[in-house]
Amino acid sequence: MRVPITRTVEAAVSAASTKLARDTPAGTCAFLFLLLFLASCATHKDMQHRVVISVKDQRLAVLDRQTLIAVYPVSTSKYGVGDWRGSYRTPVGELEIAQKIGDGMPPGTVFKDRRQTGEIVGVNALGRDPIVTRIIWLRGLELQNGNAFRRDIYIHGTPEERNIGLPVSYGCVRMKSEDVVKLYDVVGTGAHVTIVDEPLAAVVSGLANATQTALTIRSGMTIR
C-alpha cells in the first residue's frame, strides 16, 4: 500500500521530536533544521505534468496542467500487459516517476544496471539493443502495478528506432533518443504516469482541456 509522503514526513517529525526537541537552544535548532529539510523533500514532486501511454496506439502524451503539449511514438512489451515478475510485460494503471538517470549524457549513451558503460551506440546499430540516452524509472501506485519499480520498468531510449511504434520491448517503454531527451527535460520526479490498453484519444481527451486534443492524437501529429 502506498503511504502519502506527507504522512511519512509527519511520522518522521514526530519521532525526531522526541529525541531532538529538548529544552536547549541546540536541540531546538536541530529539530527546526530537520523539520525544514523534511518539508522541502515533501514539496519537490512534479504535480504540473502528467504522462499518458497507450499500449494500443503505441503512443505517449505529455500534459502540462491539463493541456496537451506533446505526443510521441513508443514501443511497449511484445508480450502484452501485466506486472508479475518474469513476465516481461508492460504494467498498466497509475504510476509515478521515481527517479531520472542520465542528465546531460549524449544521445546513444549506454547504461547497464543504470550506470554508464562509457559506450555510445548509434541509431539502428545492427545487433545492439541496450538501454541508451536517458532512464525514467517508474514506481507503481496500485496493486496491479506494484512490482514495476522492482522489475526495473523504465521509459528509456533505444538504438532500435526502426521498431518504435511496434510492441517489441521486454516490459519497458522505449522511445527514440531525441524524444526521450525532450520528455526527460520536461517531467520531474513524482509526475504521474498513466499506462492504458486503450486508445490514447479516449483517455487524454478526458484529462486535457485543449480543444484539438482528440484530433491531434488521431491524426498522428507530434506537437512540441
Image (cartoon, rainbow, N blue to C red):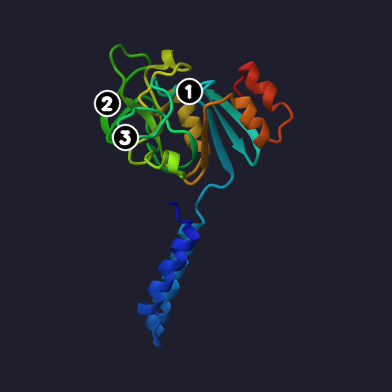
Residue 119 marker: 2
Locate residue 137 relative to residue 57 in the image: left or right. left
Q: Is residue 209 above or below residue 78?
A: below
Name the amino acid, label 3. Arg
Residue plotted at (43% across, 39% down): 145
Q: Residue furthest left?
A: 117
**Front position in the image: 213 or 223:** 213
Do callouts 3 and 1 mark residues in contact (Cβ within 8 Å)? Answer: no
Residue 107 x/y as whole percent: 39, 26
Q: CA distance from mark 3 to mark 1?
A: 22 Å
Residue 74 marker: 1
- Depth check, mark 2 against mark 3: the one in front is 3
Helix, strand or loop for disc 3: loop
Name the amino acid, label 1. Val
Residue plotted at (50% across, 37% down): 93
> Which comes before the other along the chain, label 3 or label 1?
1
Do callouts 2 and 3 mark residues in contact (Cβ within 8 Å)? Answer: no
Helix, strand or loop for disc 2: strand
Residue 85 x/y as whole percent: 31, 35
**Front position in the image: 99 or 120:** 99
Residue plotted at (42% across, 12% down): 162
Q: Is residue 122 above or below residue 9?
A: above
Locate residue 54 relative to residue 207 in the image: left or right. left
Q: Is residue 124 above or below residue 54?
A: above
How many labels sit on residues? 3
Residue 150 x/y as whole percent: 33, 41
**Front position in the image: 19 or 181:** 19
Residue 222 x/y as whole percent: 59, 22
State the residue position of label 3: 85
